[in-house]
Image (cartoon, helix red, strand yellow):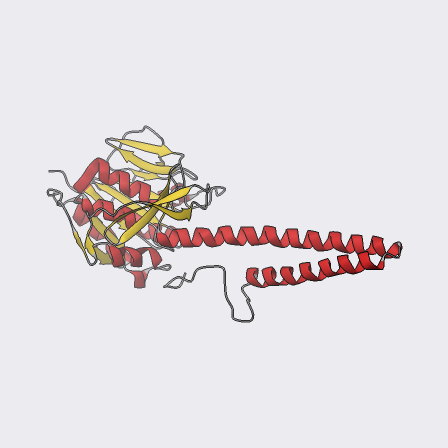
Amino acid sequence: MPGHDIIAVGASAGGVEVLIALIGGLPSDLPASLFVVLHLPATARSLLPQILERTTRMPVGVAVDGEPVERGRIYIAPVDNHLMLGEGVVRVVYSAKENGHRPAVDPLFRTASEAYGPRVVGVVLSGTRDCGTVGLLAIKRRGGIAVVQDPKDALFPDMPQSALDNVPVDHCVPLARLPPLLVDLVHQRTGEAPAKAQTPHGLVGEKVEAPEIEFTCPDCGGNLTRNGDGAVLSYRCKVGHRYSPEGLEEEQAEALEAALWVALRTIEDTAALARRMAARAAERNQLTVVAHFEEKVRQAEERGALVRRALMGKDGGNGVSLRPRHRRAT
C-alpha cells in the first residue's frame, strides 16, 4: 500500500503566516503532493506562490486544470476558482461558492477523499467559521488522516476548533509540530478504509434525510436542502451553493444588511420627495396638502431612524448587531 502521499491543506484568516512556517518546515524531498486552499476575495491578487517559494525548494505554483498530480510539488488554489482532485489529475473549477468562498476548503477535501481514499491527510489551519469540517469528515470516512492545528496555537481558532468538535481528529498539534508530523505520516503505510468512523456525536457514515426546508440560498435565492453526516449538517441549493449552519447564518446576516441599506436609501428618497412636495404645496398656500406631506416626512424619518439603528448595531441601546456572534473570538 502507498503512504499518505496526498496532503490537502485548508486555511483562512491568519493562514499566510501558518503556511509559511508549515511549508518551510518540510523537507524538499518529501514524497508527497501538497494542495493548498487559502480563502481570498475574488478580486484579490494572490502572492502566496511567490511567498512560499522563498521558504522551500519544492516547486510551488498555482494549480492548472488538467495537470498531473506529481509528488514533491505544491499546488495552490487559484483566486476565484475551486481546487479539486481527480484520479491522477488536478481540477480547477469555476463553480458555485461554498460557505461563501471560492476557492473553498471543503471541495478540495471532498474530492481528494473520493479520488485517493486512505492516502489523504487533511490539515485544517487557522481560520474563522467552520470551513473544512464537512470535508475533513469525508476524509475520515474514507480512511484518511485528520490533522488540525491546536486552536490555542492558532491566530483564528474557529476552523480547527470546529473540526475538533465534530470530527474524530487523529492529531491536534501546535504549528511547530506540524511539519515533523506530516513527514511521519507520509512515510506510514496506509490501511484499508474503515466502513464507518466514530465521532463524539455518532457515526460519520450515518445518512441524514434531506427534505426541502424553508430556507433560501443567500447567493441565488433558490431553495436549500439539508444534507449531513452525523452531527454536521450542510445546506445545498440546486445550482451547487453549499453552506454549513454557521456559514449560512453569516451569509444571511450579510444579505439582511444589504437589504437594510437598500431600505434606508429608499426611505430617505421618500422623505426627500415628500419635503419637496410639501414645499411646493406651501408656495401655493395648500395647507392641507402641506400637512399631508409633512406627516409623510415624519413617518419616513422615524422608519429611517429604526433602520439606521439596526445597521449601526444599536437597537434601543441594547447593542444588538446584525452579525452572528461566534463562540470563539475572530
Quadrant in which the N terminus appears: top left
Q: From this view, report whether residue 87 is shown above or below residue 197.
A: above
Question: Residue 185 vs residue 233: left or right?
Answer: left
Percent coordinates x, y for residue 296 in the rendering: 72, 58
Residue found at the very far top of the displayed protein: 66
Percent coordinates x, y for residue 256 in the rendering: 51, 53
Tell me, yes or no, if residue 7 can be seen here: yes
For the image shown, how many numbered marks are present on the structure?
Answer: 0
Residue plotted at (16% across, 50% down): 197
Question: Residue 249 vs residue 199: left or right?
Answer: right
Question: Residue 260 vs residue 171: left or right?
Answer: right
Tell me, yes or no, if residue 60 can be seen here: no
Percent coordinates x, y for residue 228 in the rendering: 27, 48
Q: From this view, report whether residue 322 is shown above or below residue 78.
A: below
Quadrant in which the C terminus appears: bottom left
Q: From this view, report whether residue 308 is shown above or below residue 56.
A: below
Percent coordinates x, y for residue 36 in the rendering: 33, 43
Residue plotted at (59% across, 53% down): 261
Residue found at the very far front of the displayed protein: 288
